[in-house]
Amino acid sequence: MTDEEIQERVFDIFSKEAQLDRGSLTAESVLQDLNIESLDMVQILFGIEETFEVYVPQEEVENLKTMGDVIDGIKQLLDKNDS
């Protein structure tokens, strides 16, 4: 899966679960500025885990500040699963 495919899927998940404008999301978007409710964030994490077939550890979630951080974290989890 390419970096662009990962990014597109992440943006799709965030826009669907948190009712965000898909076109306004960029890798630089700050998660806190998106005003995502905690229940929506749980749904986003479930969506990520299901879509990418990875487990996202809670301690990793707390370190995510931007959409780019989310994308990079997924890439790392996918790389870990491939090895």
Image: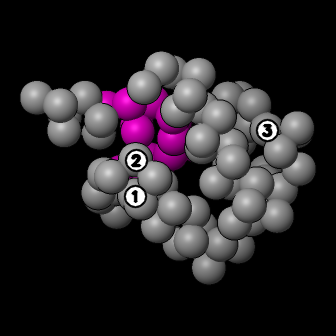
Front label number (3 vs 1):
1
Name the spot of residue 31 as percent of width and height, x first: 68, 49
Q: Amino acid at mark 3?
A: Leu
Q: Amino acid at mark 2?
A: Phe
Q: Which residue is situated farthest in the bottom direction here?
A: 39
Residue at numbered disc 2 = 52
Residue at numbered disc 3 = 25
Q: CA separation, marks 3 and 1?
A: 20 Å
Q: Is residue 59 visible?
A: no
Residue at x 41% of width, y 60% of height:
50
Residue at x 83% of width, y 45% of height:
22
Q: CA separation, marks 2 and 3?
A: 19 Å
Residue at numbered disc 1 = 49
Name the spot of residue 57 as percent of width and height, x first: 29, 58
Give the magenta-colored segment's residue range: 60-76
Point out the tag, 3 or 1, that comes first from the N-terminus.
3
Q: Can you say whether 56 is above or below 40 in the image?
A: above
Q: Which residue is situated farthest in the left direction here?
A: 83
Residue at x 46% of width, y 67% of height:
46
CB atoms at circles 2 and 1 under 8 Å apart? Answer: yes
Viewport quadrant of the C terminus: top left
For label 2, the SS is helix
For label 3, the SS is loop
Q: Amino acid at mark 1?
A: Glu
